Image: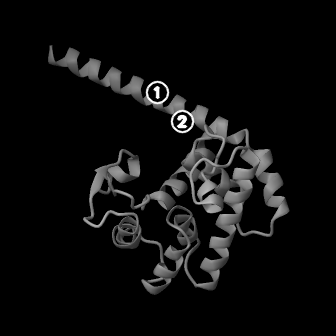
Amino acid sequence: MFKLIRRILVLLFLLFVGYKTAQVYQNVKQVMTYRSVVREVLAEQDTQANEELILAMIYTETKGQSVDLMQSSESISGQTNTITDNKTSIRQGIQTLSDNLNKATSANVDAWTAVQAYNFGSGYIDYVSQNGGENTLDVAKTYSKEVVAPSLGNLEGQTYFYLNPIALLNGAELYVNGGNYYYSRQVQLNLYIMKLMNWF
């Protein structure tokens, strides 16, 4: 009886893994449909950003399932979902990231600080510059708790459960109104996933 239960559990696990793999594959293929637009916009700008990074950020932000692909409305209007076409979202997202990369270079911090600042805002670059010069998880978490969350009303350090593979390895929580301090690591993971999936 125990062997039968174990086999059923293994089968269910394999089915779940298969389903999630197929879902990720479909999401990657959806994001890749925007590759030509990303190339076109990158060609318009003098930027340190590259195609693979932008596509990984689109995957991280929306998996290609939203008109505002890069969730870049806030950097224009201060409000979410005000961008109404994909190309404008990509253009604004690339501009924001490019500005962050330039600022990171000037501040002598690593490029992943600029990526994390896409989620936190460019003030994070100055913070990292004054706190070791490298975007570590501890630095990002502290900034989320002590700067971002209080600025948006979370003065008590309240957290919520966050289901994500990287988060599960590091406490599985985020601060309410504190942005996503795992963001740059998610982009790195998604960069790898997209390369892997595009081999098939």
Give the percent coordinates (x, y) of residue 47: 75, 69
Tag on residue 18?
A: 1
Mark 1 or mark 2, which has the lower sequence index? 1
Which residue is at the front of the view, 34 or 165? 34
Residue at 61% in and 45% down:
194
Q: Secondary structure at mark 1?
A: helix
Give the percent coordinates (x, y) of residue 28: 62, 39
In this rendering, is residue 30 above or below 188? above
Q: Quadrant of the C terminus?
A: top right
Left or right of 91 in this view: 108: left
Left or right of 129 in this view: 15: left
Residue at 36% in and 70% down:
138
The amino acid beneath tag 2 is Val
The residue to which callout 2 is attached is 24
In this rendering, is residue 124 above or below 174? below
Q: State which mark lies toward you, 1 or 2.
A: 2
Residue at 60% in and 53% down:
57
Q: Are marks 1 and 2 in contact (CB under 8 Å)?
A: no
Q: Residue furthest left?
A: 1
